[in-house]
Structure formats: C-alpha cells, structure tokens
Image (cartoon, helix red, strand yellow):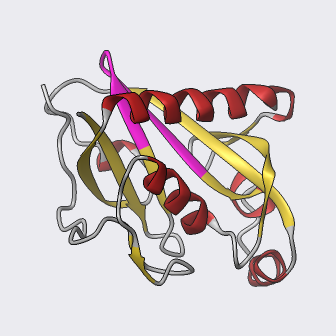
Amino acid sequence: MEAVYLLKYSTWGHHSLAFYHNQMLTEYTYGDWELFALNRRDAWTAWKNMTFLTQGALGRKSIFLKSGDSICERFIGCESVAQFLAPAEKVRLLEQKLQKDYLLNIETEVFNSKEGVFFVKHEVPYWGFHNCNHQLVEWLEFLGAKVSGRVLYDPRLIEGMVPKQKSITVLP
C-alpha cells in the first residue's frame, strides 16, 4: 500500500490528489481552462463554464517537502489534507497516466502565478456534469476508493473519511 493525499481547497469545494516520493510532493488537479489555468474567476465565466462544455485543464505542482512539513501551508487556499492508502501498483499506474496526459499537451503549458500551479489543456471537457470533483472521483475509483455524496459539489470522496485536520504532515 502507498500513501496518497487528498487536498481540499476553499475555491468552490475543489479537491486534488498528491503523491509523495523522494521528498517531492506532486499535486494533480483538474478544472476549467479559463477558471483555473487563466484564473478568470468571475461569476459569468463560472456560470458559462458550468453550463456549456469548455476546455478542460490538467494542473500540476511539485514542491520539495521533508518529513514533518505541513502540506496546506505550501498550497494556496488549501483548507485540509487527508491521507489514505491505496494499492501501490494502482498508485503508480495513475501517476504514470497523469504524467503522460500532462506531457502530451506540454506545448499548451501556462503558469497560474496566483495559484502557483502549472496547467496544460486536457482532452476531457469541463462543465457542470464533469467538473473537478467528477474527474477526481474517477481517479479515486481507479485507486479503489468508495465514493458517495454529491459529486457536483461537496462529495464524500472516500467512504467514511472527511478531512478534519487543518493540515497533516508527510510520513517519514
């Protein structure tokens, strides 16, 4: 089994996944190109992009993190982090898929300086019935997680687990 980190953000109930190897924490996130990559966070853009199919974005952020460091302090807007264990082979396969998807569109890469995250265009369109939480549910289910609740907003992403801590630390 291998540790995976679920990060919850204050922005519209957004969640992401992070993986930790060799003192490097790499977060992957999914969202709308305009809302997340270009940081257009106005009401019109949000409404339009939840109503109609729009360009999806895959985000990635990697930071050096040593044992005992707080995760949320290093990720802007992070409210809480929950760690869970998943089969190591599935974790490896998901990480490889996300890295491959990211590198396939590297020529579209932009840096959102406000969030501190790099984004590329993603082949999966974004809208109300496939938003950041829907994509995350697919990733979690691939890892074997049981997902319930309102996926559109505030889902119970891992059965019986709600992140309750402001931050957790990386395992030694």
Q: Quadrant of residue 58?
A: top right
State the quadrant of the N terminus: top left
Q: Position of residue 137 (x, y in %)?
A: 50, 62
Q: Is residue 155 visible?
A: no
Q: Residue at 52% across / 70% down in the picture?
A: 11
Q: Above or below — where is 42 with respect to 104?
A: below
Q: How many numbered marks are there?
A: 0
State the quadrant of the C terminus: top left
Q: Magenta includes 165?
A: no
Q: Magenta includes 22?
A: yes
Q: Residue at 77% across / 56% down in the picture?
A: 56
> Which residues, given as a range, are shown in magenta?
18-29
Q: Above or below — where is 65 with respect to 59?
A: above
Q: Position of residue 77 (x, y in %)?
A: 44, 60
Q: Residue at 71% across / 79% down in the picture?
A: 128
Q: Position of residue 6 (x, y in %)?
A: 36, 53
Task: Report whether 53 appears left or right of 38.
Answer: right
Q: Position of residue 95 (x, y in %)?
A: 51, 31
Q: Quadrant of residue 92?
A: top left
Q: Nearer the viewer, residue 156 or 77?
A: 156
Q: Nearer the viewer, residue 142 or 45?
A: 142
Magenta residues: mostly which secondary structure?
strand
Q: Is residue 79 visible?
A: yes
Q: Above or below — where is 126 with respect to 30?
A: below
Q: Above or below — where is 142 with respect to 63?
A: below
Q: Quadrant of residue 49?
A: bottom right
Task: Report whether 51 appears left or right of 17.
Answer: right
Task: Report whether 48 appears left or right of 5.
Answer: right
The residue lying furthest to the top in this view is 22
Q: Residue at 51% across / 51% down in the picture?
A: 139
